[in-house]
Image (cartoon, rainbow, N blue to C red):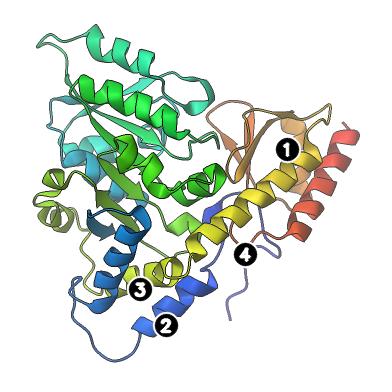
Amino acid sequence: MIATPYPRRQFGSDNFAGICPEAWAGLAEANHGHSESYGNDPWTADACRLIREVLETDCEVFFVFNGTAANSLALASFCHSYDGIFCHQLAHVEKDECGAPEFFTGGAKLIPLPGANAKLDPATLEQAAQARTDIHFCKARAVTITQGTEAGTVYRPEEIRALTSTAHRLGLRVHMDGARFANAVASLGCRPREITWEAGVDVLSFGGTKNGIPVGDAVVFFNKELAREFDYRAKHGGQLASKMRFMSAPWVGMLRDGAWLRHAAHANAMAQRLEAAISGLPAIRVSYPRQANAVFVQMAPALAQSLEARGWTFYQMHGEPDYRFMCAWDTTPEDVDAFAKDVREVAAGS
């Protein structure tokens, strides 16, 4: 038996967590007998139906292996090689996807923009879109926003509506990177439609992996015309799973009784518990409003090293003195309390 690399749950990433019970059950149910391949199976059909029910609209749904593929192929579905795509300067598409959006679009240029708390605002978007409209610069085509953001914050419905209204007036398509979409919905306490199609989003990358699914995110087109021939694009990009049911069946397990939202709410609650336990420490400063399942702090590198020496794993983010403490679906109150205790002890000794 292979030993677990960590003797206890960590705060490095929600990707560290295993498969949640509901997703595991869905996977096990699909592992009996033979079934059609390449998505022509009942589990994939059921997963698509459940996503439409959750989002309360008729939409086109495709499953791909990961969020990078979901974001990049979605953007490629409506961007030419000479186009420009606006994003926040901390966006995952800009910082953490190894040029995949540019690759799959054939060269479309990502244009990073500033914004408080990792969120874009309409005025900045409009100014950037109108700054260059000559033929010597790329053509403004799209904007991508992250929900929840790379700083652990969340766009409110009215913020999304303001952005999409500006984008559409400028002729831009709107993509939402929803790697932690479930955490955003749980944080806002809203219906998923209120921050997607009803707010003007054209296509959503619906993340499942960080919420307890083993592998596979969904690309959801609310503007169905944009989905034309996306099946060919996914196949061309190496994203058509032959045994698709093993990507889609965990979604069935997660969606059929609301586990996707319960797990997200739990992860958020654990992050809230952690923030409450360490905020106010003189050696620790919370960097951003905690609105989802991450707590970002600024602290001296020596403090971070002391925590690592006690066996804790977490990430330093954004090239700044920001450290991210991430909670997952399986984080327990005891995990949080043990980590917070060490944070307080280390901070007190600084």
First reached walking from the N terminus: tag 3 or tag 2: 2
Query: Mark 2 sits on what residue?
Result: 28
Residue hosting label 1: 304
Mark 3 or 1: the one toward you: 3
Sequence-first disc among 3 and 1: 3
Q: Are marks 3 and 1 in contact (CB under 8 Å)?
A: no
Q: Residue furthest right?
A: 349
Tell me where residue 121 sits by quadrant: top left
Q: Residue at x 16, y 42 (%)?
A: 77
Residue in the foreground of this view, choosing between 227 and 198: 198
Mark 4 and mark 2: Cα distance apart in space: 25 Å
Q: Nearer the viewer, mark 4 or mark 2?
A: 2
Inter-mark Cα distance, 3 to 2? 8 Å
Who comes first in sequence, dot 4 or dot 2?
4
Q: Mark 1 or mark 2, which has the lower sequence index?
A: 2
The x and y percentages for residue 97 are 35, 40
Is residue 72 placed above or below 124 in the rendered structure? below
3D distance between C-alphas at marks 3 and 1: 40 Å
Residue at label 3? 249
**Disc 2 residue type?**
Ala
The answer to which of 174 and 93 lies nearer the viewer is 174
* Label 3 secondary element: helix
Residue highlighted by disc 4: 5
Q: Amino acid at mark 1?
A: Ala
Q: Amino acid at mark 4?
A: Pro
**80 with respect to 334 (left or right):** left
User: Residue at position x 41%, y 48% from top?
Assistant: 192
| Residue 288 locus on image (x, y percent) | 62, 29
Q: Residues within 10 Å of mark 1 (few under 14, many from 20)?
A: many
Spatial CA distance of label 1 from label 4 is: 20 Å
